[in-house]
Image: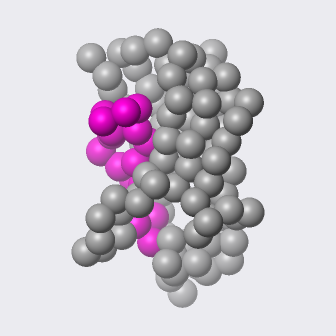
Amino acid sequence: QVQLVESGGGLVQPGGSLRLSCAASGFPFSTYTMTWVRQAPGKGLEWVSGINADGSSTAYSDSVKGRFTASRDNAKKMLYLQMNSLKPEDTAVYYCTKGPDRGQGTQVTVSS
């Protein structure tokens, strides 16, 4: 049974940083590409970032490129998203996903 548990969200001022974590279990984590998506209030899901199985390749949406960095620790079955220079428009619930599976999400609020 796939389990994905996100953590690390919170309230941060514009320009601040947060590091999101996702603990994975129930599947061979090291063999799967993983993604981060987000959902802002009243909007649909938005793809944010992807990272391949061994972590050697990442991709980002234009809206976060240069500010966010995805990484993973396959030994610990953990996925991370380092978010810097946060903007109010980054406010959303952030999810890690494996295909159609996603966790409960973690809320990120960027506000002064």
The one of 72 and 13 positioned closer to us in this rendering: 72
Q: Is residue 7 visible?
A: no
Q: Horizontal placement of 36 versus 53: left or right?
A: left
Region rendered in magenta: 91-108
Determine the image quadrant of residue 12.
bottom right
Q: Residue at x 40, y 15 (%)?
A: 27
The one of 66 and 75 positioned closer to us in this rendering: 66
Residue 108: % across, % down: 45, 64
Determine the image quadrant of residue 62.
bottom right
Q: Horizontal placement of 65 versus 103: left or right?
A: right
Most common secondary structure along the magenta stretch = strand
Q: Is residue 94 magenta?
A: yes
Q: Is residue 23 magenta?
A: no
User: Is 80 rendered above or below residue 107?
Assistant: above
The one of 63 and 96 positioned closer to us in this rendering: 63
Q: Is residue 43 visible?
A: yes
Residue 57: % across, % down: 70, 36
Q: Residue at x 35, y 49 (%)?
A: 105
